[in-house]
Each structure stands twice: as structure tokens, then as C-alpha cells.
Image: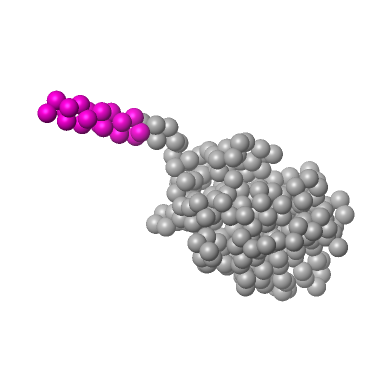
Amino acid sequence: MLRFLFILLFSAVLVFSQKKEGSNLSPAEELAIKAIQAHGGEKFKNMKSLVIRGNADISGSPTATFPATFLIVFSGEDKYFLEINNPFQPFKQAYDGVNTYSTLGNFSLPPINRIGLQLLQNLGRDGFVVSELPEKTKKKQGFRITSPEGYYTDFFLDEKTKRIKAYEASYLVQNRTVTTSVEIDKFREVEGVVLPERYAQRFDLGNLTVYMDFKAKEILVNTEIDERIFSSVR
């Protein structure tokens, strides 16, 4: 009987200590973990490569909309390739882990692996900080993640599913502040990973606002990637 009471007491202390240790997570960190679970958990976190290909409608005003196609490729923790093909200003940008390549000469967008869901995938890596949303968005359920370079994204969650339903980011491009916001309309599950299939994105460039509606036709997870795509934008 005495031995049974000792085991019971020891188990209670162990459970209490585990709860206490878990309580060290901030509310923002707890939401970030729930978001990762909602997007596939370890399969999302450990995704080695991602290819998204589809169509987009781009507009700078309500009366000027033109069609485009897009291709986004991610590999490993940092490498990426982005192509937006349209009749007016085709654009490519790539990063091989060291250098950034752009078809627009000295102009380049901030690293796209530091914005949006790819930033969320870095949760737990050194230098990636999770914090509460700024005061102006406190009424929304979500969190902010900031990369070691200072890029950040504010994520907003669907209260029921805990999936990312929208996000916002702000960054500098050639001494100009650019803000972008994304609203996700539809998801697709691929290899156990839940990813955006349809989403609308707005870029506010100060003197110009660009709207883009994306629809993914093909989404590939953990497929083999030709690494040469990250070192050239020809």
C-alpha cells in the first residue's frame, strides 16, 4: 500500500512538472504550433521541396487586369525560384543559398522564403522569433514571426481550423516601404501537407497598389528538384 501511494505521488509530481514546463510557451508560440499542426504538423515542418505552378490575374486598377502564369520553387531551408510570366513585365528571381539573381537588374524582391508560410516552416530555428501581434491587430487571433534578417509576417488564424487564413508583411525595397497582404480562399492537401490553392495578394508600393489573384494548378511536395534552377534566371 505504501509503495502504491509513493508511485501515485511520484506520478502526480511528474505530471505537474510537465504542465509547468509546457506553460513556458507564450500564447503566440502556442498559436504558431497549432497553425503548424493544422497545416500538416511534422510533414509541413520537414517539407524538403515545394513546387507550385498556376495562373494569376494581375491588376493595377479595377479596369486594367491582365493574365499571367507563375512558378514558385522552394528547396531545403533557403533556396527558391520565382517566375511571374505576363505580356508586360515578365519577372524571375532566384536564390541559391548565397546569391540572389533577378531579371530586373539591380531590383529584387525580399527573399520569398522569409515571408508567408515558408517563414512559418522555420519555427524553432535559431534566430526566428515568435511574438504577439501588434496592438492594431490585437482583436485578431494570430502571431508574428521575425526572421534573423528582420523580415516579419503577421499571421491570422481561422478560429475553428487554426489554419492560416491571411497574413501581412512589410519590408524595404530600395529605401521604399512595401506592404503586402494575403487572403487565402482555398487549400489543397498534398502528401499530408495543407497548402494554399487559391489566394489574393495585394502589394502597396506607396504610389501604386498591385492586386494579384493566384490559382495553383499543380502543387508538388518533396519532389526532386534540378538545383541549377536556383543559380540562373535566363
Compared to residue 185, the image places residue 23 above or below, namely above
| Residue displayed at 80% across by 66% down | 90
Q: Quadrant of residue 102?
A: bottom right
Magenta span: chief secondary structure: helix
Position of 232 with respect to 75 (left or right) is right
For the N terminus, the quadrant is top left
| Residue displayed at 50% across by 51% down | 42
Compared to residue 8, the image places residue 143 above or below, namely below
Residue 148 can be seen, yes or no: yes
206 falls in the magenta region: no
For the C terminus, the quadrant is bottom right
Q: How is the image coloured?
A: one colour
Camera-nearest residue between 13 and 187? 13
8 falls in the magenta region: yes
| Residue displayed at 55% across by 40% down | 124
Camera-nearest residue between 56 and 140? 56
Q: Position of residue 60 (x, y in %)?
A: 72, 65
Q: Position of residue 146 (x, y in %)?
A: 61, 41
- Furthest toward the right, the residue is 105
Compared to residue 162, the image places residue 128 above or below, namely above
Position of 117 with respect to 211 (left or right) is left
Position of 42 with respect to 57 (left or right) is left
Q: Position of residue 26 (x, y in %)?
A: 45, 36
Q: Quadrant of residue 57?
A: bottom right
| Residue displayed at 30% across by 34% down | 15
Residue 185 can be seen, yes or no: no
Q: Position of residue 21 (x, y in %)?
A: 39, 31
Give the residues in magenta: 1-19
- Furthest toward the left, the residue is 1
